[in-house]
Amino acid sequence: SDVNWAEIIFVSALTGQRCLKVYDAVKRAIKNHRARVPTATLNEIIREAMLFQPPPASAARGAGKIYFVSQISVMPPTIVAMCNDPRLFTDNYRRYLERKLRESLDFSGTPIRLILRGKRLREEIRDASK
């Protein structure tokens, strides 16, 4: 499902059983929604994920490479991965990277935005002239 990051709590409206657990879940979600993760930690998680399962490669364009990863904002946590070409990463591989981030970090109760950003045109021109 699209909101598999959301915590599920079973409560009873009839008896009120476990209703107070909702407040604890909301507090955890707020804490995770505002969480900051060091760049070194993000880079290590993504590097290990890519070593375990490399991105799919095409004969025409080659394989995708991620150079570094950084968190640029919170509420929701937004993570940018600088890569050679975002089009080389399939939707399945993006979900795989997000899943690996969730397994390694506690982002329960909040969505994660994972943005793959390629080289800018100016950088490509500069690199080509070298």
Image: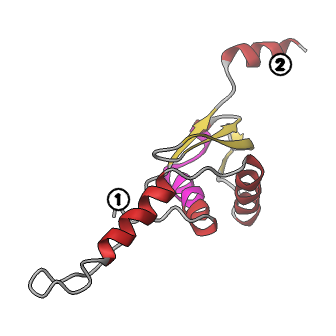
Q: Is residue 67 left or right of residue 113?
A: right
Q: Would residue 57 be counted in the magenta stretch?
A: no
Q: Residue at x 47, y 53 (%)?
A: 33
Q: Pick whichever, 11 or 90, lies toward us.
A: 11
Amino acid type indicated by mark 2: Asp
Q: Nearer the viewer, residue 30 or 88?
A: 30
Give the x, y percent position of residue 112: 49, 51
Q: Is residue 75 above or below residue 125?
A: below
* Residue 52 placement, left or right of 6: right
| Quadrant assignment for the N terminus | bottom left
The quarter of the picture where residue 4 lies is: bottom left
Confirm whether the magenta stretch covers residue 90.
yes
Residue 5 visible? The answer is no
* Residue found at x 34% / y 59%: 2
Residue at 68% x, 42% y is: 70
- Of residues 75 and 27, the one nearer the viewer is 27
Q: CA distance from mark 2 to mark 1?
A: 39 Å
Sequence-first disc among 2 and 1: 1
Label 2 sits on residue:
127
Residue at label 1? 2
Above or below: residue 9 compared with residue 85: below
Helix, strand or loop for the magenta stretch, by majority: helix
Q: Residue at x 16, y 83 (%)?
A: 16
Instruction: Please say which color scheme the image uses.
Output: secondary structure
Region rendered in magenta = 87-98
Label drawn at residue 54 = none
Tell me which amino acid carries mark 1: Asp
